[in-house]
Image (spheres, rainbow, N blue to C red):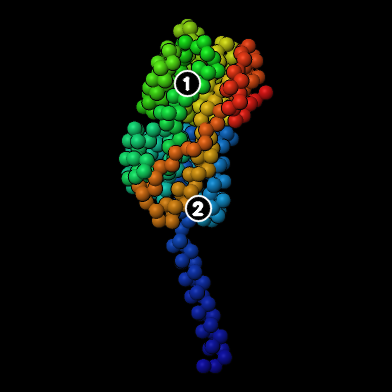
Amino acid sequence: MDRRAFLGALAAIGLLVIAATATAEQGARAPRIGVLSGQPADKDLCLQRFRQGLSELAYVEGKTHVLEIRRSEGRQEPIPRLAGELVGLKVDLIVSLTSEAHLSVKQATATIPVVMAASTYPVEQGLVASLARPGGNITGLATFTPDLMAKRVQILKEAVPTVSRLAVIRQPGHRNDLIVRDYETAAQQLGINLRVVEVRGPEDLAGAFQKAVRDRAQAVMSTQGPFFALHAARIAELALKNRLPSLSGEVPLGPEAGILLSYGPSVSDDCQRAASYVDRILKGAKPGDLPVEQPTKFELVINLKTAKALGMTIPPSLLQRADQVIE
């Protein structure tokens, strides 16, 4: 073979290598991860922490994976439609960042792997068969449990020893039915009469507090979810205006917004931990074989500025147990 023919052959081989490489890169498509969030983009700490978790596991958005994000922005109505959109996109995996969305995602797909962040009563809601062996296509984190709900009522009673009538603000939904059930059980054991006030949107909050006052409530609590996180400042404002000590499950967001107390695990921590489930599933693990994790750390946050504005004195025993005190 002469020199010209040899160089031509090398060039042809080079072109074949380039073509093969390009074909391989196209075949190794970056997985698409559907994300169903309850918060608007400018307040979505959960998504920020999920992205941080992926980054710490060496994932680079746009290279190793693509996120398809859908937001309900604190509203329940669009959630089934948004879950259907993600399934229609044929994403490789769905991460549900809000408890309201888990059931909708389950109803939308039985085959796409699903990771729950911050789930509430996943076994009782039929999301998984058990915490140890979820089965099916769903796994993740069980953030809120019956024991936690009972502890919240106990902490409120400790902060306000004279409370005998308690208002609970809730949104419609089976998950909130379960939370109210456990609040009621704990309240009965402590001799507290509990009344439920239902809201569907932020426009209902002022009326809900008016009803609580008419029912002679001496304190107020909420159930759980993006709605209560998104409108924590408004709830704090109305609680203070109506002279009602308040407890929120949004830690530490509730007291930072002016609510008197919050107790529970950090939802944002769970959102970050959800990334480890995504990593394992993308590497071949089956969701049904990955145990659902439960929180091991709970935080008590107290807003002393709010206590002072209400003319309250928080018992020293409660202050000593607080993980954070806002002064």
Q: Residues within 10 Å of mark 2 (few under 14, many from 20)?
A: some
Q: Give the residue drawn at x 61%, y 20%.
A: 316
**Element at label 2:** loop
**Dot 2 corresponds to which residue?**
65
Label 2 sits on what residue type? His
Residue 94 in percent (x, y) is at 43, 44
Q: Residue 149 at x, y = what percent? A: 44, 26
Q: Residue at x 48, y 48 (%)?
A: 276
Asked whether residue 299 is in view, the answer is: yes
Element at label 1:
helix
- The percent position of residue 238, horizontal first and vertical second, equals 56, 15
- Quadrant of the frame with the C terminus: top right
Residue sitting at x 50%, y 53%: 65
Residue 153: give its label: 1
Residue type beneath disc 1: Val
Asked if residue 307 lies left or right of residue 186, the reply is right
Which one is nearer the viewer's eye here, 252 or 146? 146
